[in-house]
Image (spheres, rainbow, N blue to C red):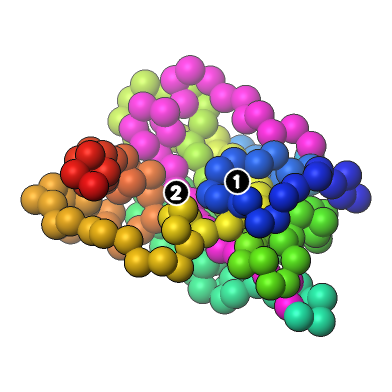
Amino acid sequence: MTKKLEINWDQLGFEYIKTDYRYLSFWKDGQWDEGVLTEDNVLHLGEAAPCLHYGQQCFEGLKAYRTKNGEIQLFRVDQNAKRFQDSCQRLLMPVIPEETFIKACLEVVKANAAYIPPYGTGGSLYIRPMMIGVGNSMAVKPANEYIFTVFCMPVGAYFKGGLTPVNFMVSDYDRAACNGTGQQKVGGNYAASMLAHEIAVKNG
C-alpha cells in the first residue's frame, strides 16, 4: 500500500513528515463508526468545536521499530491504550476499546511500513493516536461528536544531539495543576510548558 518517499534516514529529527495513510473514525449518536484508512491528512471540523476552545482532546505517542532481522515491533502498545482510555475518561470523552486502539495502530504501521527507518539508523516510526471533541458547541461541556485518528511519521532523536547529554534548567512554572490533568496525556499540559521551554532555550 505504501507509496514511499525518498528519505535520508541519517538526517531524521522530530519534524512532521506526511506518510501515506492514517486511521480515521467518527463518534456520533452514541457510537463509533467502522473506521477507515485514508490518504487525507486534513481534519475537517467546525469553528466552535470544543477541542479548539476548551481543550477537549487527548493523544498518545508510541513507536514501531525495525529489528535486525527485518521484523517490525511495537513497544507496549497495550499500555498506551490503557493510558489513552484514562485520558478519555478524565475529559468525559467516549472510551476507545483497547482492541480498537491496537488494531488502528497496527493498521497504520502496516500501511506505512516503508517509512520505518532501517535497523541501525537510530530511527523509528512515531505513532500518534489522538481524539478530539468536535461538533459546534459554545457551552463548556463535553462535545456531542468526536474524531479518533492515528497517524505516523519516521523520526530520529527528539533532541538534535541524539544521545548526547543536553543542559536543563529548573523553572518555577507549573506544567500541570494539582489534582488537574497532569497524569493524563492532554494538550493543555504541553501548552503550559512552552514558556518555560522558551526561557530555557534563551538561557542556553
Give the crowd class for mark 2: few <14, some 14-19, many >=20 residues within 10 Å: many
Q: Where is mark 2, residue-wise?
A: 58
Q: Where is mark 1, residue-wise?
A: 148
Residue at image coords 45%, 68%: 163
Give the crowd class for mark 1: few <14, some 14-19, many >=20 residues within 10 Å: many
**Between discs 2 and 1, the one toward the N terminus:** 2
Query: Mark 2: which secondary structure?
Result: strand
- The stretch drawn in magenta includes residue 43: yes
Q: Kindly give the residue lying farthest to the left in the view shown.
A: 172
User: Which amino acid does the dot numbered 2 rest on?
Assistant: Cys
User: Which amino acid does the dot numbered 1 rest on?
Assistant: Phe
Bounds of the magenta span?
39-67
Residue at image coords 59%, 41%: 16
Disc number for residue 133:
none
- Looking at the rendering, which quadrant does residue 202 occupy? top left
Query: Mark 1: which secondary structure?
Result: strand
